[in-house]
Amino acid sequence: MAIECLVLGAGQEVGKSCVVVTINGKRIMFDCGMHMGYDDHRRYPDFSLISKSRDFDHSLDCVIITHFHLDHVGALPYFTEVCGYNGPIYMTYPTKALAPLMLEDFRKVLVDRRGEEEQFTSLHISQCMQKVIAIDLKQTLQVDDDLQIRAYYAGHVLGAAMFYAKVGESAMVYTGDYNMTPDRHLGAAQIDRLELDLLITESTYATTIRDSKYAREREFLKAVHECVAGGGKVLIPTFALGRAQELCILLDDYWERMNLKVPIYFSAGLTIQANMYYKILISWTSQKIKETYATRNAFDFKHVHNFDRSLINAPGPCVLFATPGMISGGFSLEVFKQWAPCEMNLITLPGYCVAGTVGHKLMSGKPTKIVLDKDTQIDVRCQIHQLSFSPHTDSKGIMDLARFLSPKNVILVHGEKPKMVSLKERIQSELRIPCYLPANCDTVHIPSTTYVKAHASNAFIRSCLNPNFRFLKRSKEENSDQVLRNTNSTAPLQKKHDIQFGYCCAAQLDNLEETGNRDGALSHSDKCSCLQLLFKELSTYFSGVNIQDLGEHLQVESFQVSVCLKDNCPYRIIDSPRKEAATIFFCCSWSAADEKLAREIISAIERFNLSDNLPCKNSK
């Protein structure tokens, strides 16, 4: 069997994310976004490639949306209400709450301010969201008898999730957009160690390694402060959800510490609604936000106020957050036209801008003029400041995730081709994992895993380890049931048999209440630290044996041992009265040549008590 991946969007580009994956006959559409840089047929994915007859209900088993950004959800109402898809749609609870706000805001900008033809209506958005099934983090949802999906925390924006999908023994993860480092209002992406045939990951910053978050914050605050101190106005184009909250927290705190009186404004009424949801969905935010929530809600901004259009040309300095973030239209473009000709003013671009937008033109070099159309051009004399405040992970984060999950294959999407090529080479050379970067409308075929349970007698295994088969050539002249008795006509069977054994054993863990979890369960970091503790124990116990610590596993000859993080490991036999929460499991594999050594090591592991050496964390 194979996994088939059809890329309808974000193939060698950033925009209109949409990937259709077929796993063992089950077909899933991951994301259904629009391209912010186009206003023609290229805005939406080419859905006809899914089904020429446009019978999408029978062509797709489900649609999964990773988060509420328009390049991931913007085409969904069009696909369901105009194209006619009525099948199941899955997204997290925050995404279901916030996506309609983003969609309605975009529809208004498109129709009311730019005068474009309406692609979908407010009713379409409402009807579309009624079809959505909300899913919680780490909730395993059985779509049908064969297909199961699970969501993992992705950081990036409130409610963003990576999605795991499994059909039979074939499994994959689609990351959507994610961030491997925490910020002021969201935590870092978190995912279990999974056995995957395929990882499809974004690669927006495929070659970028960011410097310290605090250095970037200081640079941003310095640029803003210098501008307003000189009497200038600061325009921060940003989407109303995501970076807006991050930067508002940062500026609000800085204004309080510096006792600044310069007004900070937010243009979008959408933000009032968004902040309400942020307060409701506080459990999806960072640990620090949750810890301080009882005394102060971080989204109650003391120095941030709503902006009135009459203030665009008001005298004096100010800071204005205006949507949309890429200056692709709407109010941010309207303000940019007014403020760009003044040298005192500052435009600071905190994230990624798609090709074709005004933001992208500003980031590509300092232009003196921006041509919007044949009748409109803007003189650009203001300061342009670009900061990497994007919620996307950098190249180190992508490599860390690929190394952690160790999939059999990787597909890169949502990036620029030259940078993706560089990252592909790194993944293949450093991680030894086949990597692909398909363009839009390309299909990639990935071999998938198929496990067959087989029972074998000891005699059969012994015969396989020492094969001595001989085929007898049949004479062309004789009947098929006759064989030549001439020994010269016999030929040995040239076939190599490689038998690998596996066993999942448990080490003892007592007094687990000292590790900080009341229920006795080990954290992920504690489980991983157990491998290093096991290395020390084995090195002491087998002093004359060369045991290698290879990071992810320990190795002695052909024997390998690693921490098992699977809930249902096929190599595990639990016959002990101990609770599973009070047990650390190690997966072992070895060849027949090292059978005796393997038995000795496994026996030693099962006698060890690793909890004696675990770092103590006083529980509260």
Image (spheres, helix red, strand yellow):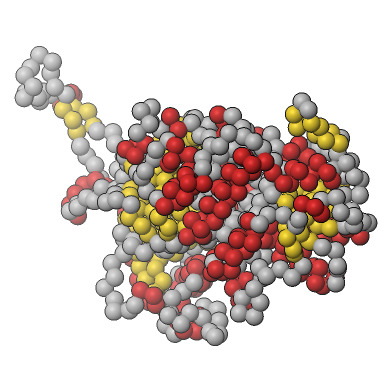
- Of residue 545 and residue 289, the one placed in the foreground of this image is 289
The location of residue 353, given as percent across then percent down, is 69, 42
- Where is residue 151, by image quadrant? bottom left
Q: Residue at x 76, y 55 (%)?
A: 308
- Where is residue 328, by image quadrant? top right
* Position above or below: 468 against 582: above
Q: Quadrant of the N terminus?
A: top left
- Looking at the rendered structure, the number of numbered marks drawn on it comes to 0
Point out the residue furthest to the right here: 230
Can the viewer see residue 174? no
Relative horizontal placement of residue 215, taking residue 207 as reference (left or right): right
The location of residue 40, given as percent across then percent down, is 59, 29
The location of residue 121, given as percent across then percent down, is 51, 42
Relative horizontal placement of residue 318, taking residue 272 as reference (left or right): right
* Position above or below: 125 against 185: above
- Of residue 609 and residue 65, the one placed in the foreground of this image is 65
Relative horizontal placement of residue 562, taking residue 114 as reference (left or right): left
Q: Residue at x 54, y 66 (%)?
A: 281
Can the viewer see residue 293? yes
The location of residue 187, given as percent across then percent down, is 59, 64
- Where is residue 371, by image quadrant? top right
Q: Quadrant of the C terminus?
A: bottom right
Q: Residue at x 56, y 48 (%)?
A: 104
Q: Residue at x 43, y 41 (%)?
A: 80
